[in-house]
Image: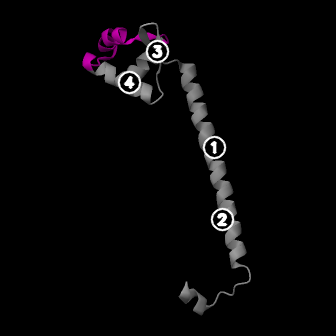
């Protein structure tokens, strides 16, 4: 609910402002606002920055899109690496099988 609110408003807020606004807007208990926001920041869903003595929190829809694209790129890179590794292992298996006769005696020893 807090993430939805920050995405809808698309402006930075201090923790005190969020503790006042979120209970009214989304029905979140004011005591749970701080842990909720800290969790969202730790997960990378909400950004934060200290400006002067205040810490501001925000979540913009464009930032969410960039984060999803970054995650997609990471997953695609990992998949490509795993495919290369699989191909290398299959080639190694084929090379190891070359010149070996598959007999019942050999199967028993394996």
| Residue 22: x %, y % from top left | 33, 14
- Report how far apart the C-alphas of labels 1 and 3 lie in the structure: 30 Å
Comparing labels 4 and 3, the label whose residue is closer to the camera: 4
**In the rendered structure, which disc, 2 or 3, sits on the residue that comes first in sequence?**
3
**In the rendered structure, which disc, 4 or 1, sits on the residue that comes first in sequence?**
4
- Residue receiving disc 2: 89
Disc 2 element: helix
Q: Magenta part of the protein: which range? A: 10-31
- Residue receiving disc 4: 38
Comparing labels 2 and 1, the label whose residue is closer to the camera: 2
| Residue 70: x %, y % from top left | 60, 33
- The numbered mark at residue 8 is 3
Query: Is residue 39 something that shows in the picture?
Result: yes
Comparing labels 1 and 3, the label whose residue is closer to the camera: 1
Say whether residue 41 is left or right of residue 87: left
Q: Total number of numbered labels? A: 4
- Report how far apart the C-alphas of labels 2 and 3 lie in the structure: 49 Å
**In the rendered structure, which disc, 2 or 1, sits on the residue that comes first in sequence?**
1
| Circles 4, 3 touching at the beta carbon (< 8 Å) | no
Q: Is residue 86 magenta?
A: no
């Amino acid at each position: 609910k807090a993430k939805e609110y920050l995405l809808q408003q698309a402006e930075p807020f201090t923790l005190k402002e969020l503790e006042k606004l979120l209970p009214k807007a989304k029905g979140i208990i004011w005591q749970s606002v701080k842990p909720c926001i800290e969790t969202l920041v730790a997960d990378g869903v909400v950004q934060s920055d200290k400006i002067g003595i205040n810490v501001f929190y925000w979540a913009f829809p464009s930032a969410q899109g960039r984060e999803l694209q970054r995650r997609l790129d990471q997953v695609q890179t990992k998949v490509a690496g795993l495919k290369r590794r699989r191909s290398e292992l299959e080639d190694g298996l084929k090379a190891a099988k070359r010149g070996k006769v598959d007999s019942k005696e050999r199967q028993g020893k394996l």
